[in-house]
Image (tube, rainbow, N blue to C red):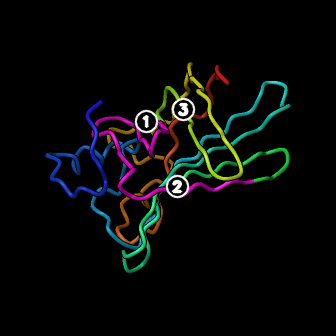
Amino acid sequence: MKESHFSQQQWLPFYNLRKIGNTTLFQGNNKRKKYFEGWYFKMVAKDASAIFSVIPGISLSADGKKQHAFIQLINGLTAQTSYYSFPIEEFRFAVSGFAISIGHNYFSKEKLILDLKDQDSVVSGKIEMSNLVEYTSGRLMNYGIMGWYRFVPFMECYHGVLSLTHDLKGQ
């Protein structure tokens, strides 16, 4: 996977053109302030005995002086949440297709790898996703779930759906 470090403002040939029709690509590569982008992974056991969400993302303050990557965990049964903050330098994104990493944590359409530690907890595991049912707009230009709002330049946040449903395997 060819990747780019968000903190290294390098020129990525044709990346901006590729992301116009591909909502799965990281959209914030040119942003340096007043921006949020995150990805919501919701996993539910077939018998609904476990519901767990993972939200990796980046947050840039209005003046751009405070920038960080994060991973938020949510237990859907207890509503307990945990928030792990990382220096923005630890956020990397793939330049083709959806894949991001934050520290030693990895997220793609095919798998999710967690390796989180703080003074109170350790969370680690690997989940593989298969048989994805992807959201498609049926148009040559994929507007994604946001429709034409996706192209409004002053939006603080953009939304995309990578999978409507899929199978999970892992621990």
Left or right of 54, for residue 3: left
Q: Is residue 94 magenta?
A: yes
- Residue at x-position 31% and y-position 44%: 21
Left or right of 40, for residue 33: left
Q: Which badge, 2 or 1, is on the more N-terminal residue?
A: 2
Q: Which residues are magenta?
A: 81-106
From the viewer's side, name the closer residue of 103 and 119: 119
**The N terminus lies in quadrant:** top left
The residue pinned by badge 2 equals 70
Residue 147, image x, y percentages: 46, 53
- Residue at x-position 66% and y-position 41%: 122
Where 127 falls versus 144 (above or below)? Answer: above
Q: Secondary structure at mark 2?
A: strand
Q: Secondary structure at mark 1?
A: loop
Which residue type does callout 2 highlight? Phe
Residue 114, image x, y percentages: 57, 36
Task: Rate crowding at label 3 as few (under 14), some (14 to 19) or many (20 or more) other CA atoms within 10 Å.
Answer: many
Which residue type does callout 3 highlight? Leu
Q: Which badge, 2 or 3, is on the more N-terminal residue?
A: 2
**The C terminus lies in quadrant:** top right
Q: Which badge, 3 or 1, is on the more N-terminal residue?
A: 3
Q: Secondary structure at mark 3?
A: strand
Q: Identify the disc placed on residue 138.
A: 1
Between the C-alphas of marks 2 and 3, the distance is 15 Å
The residue pinned by badge 3 equals 112
Between the C-alphas of marks 2 and 1, the distance is 33 Å
From the viewer's side, name the closer residue of 43 and 152: 43
- Is most of the magenta stretch helix, strand or loop? strand
Given the current orientation, which residue lies at the most extreme front position?
A: 119
The quarter holding residue 77 reads: top right
- Residue at x-position 66% and y-position 53%: 119
Q: Is residue 126 magenta?
A: no
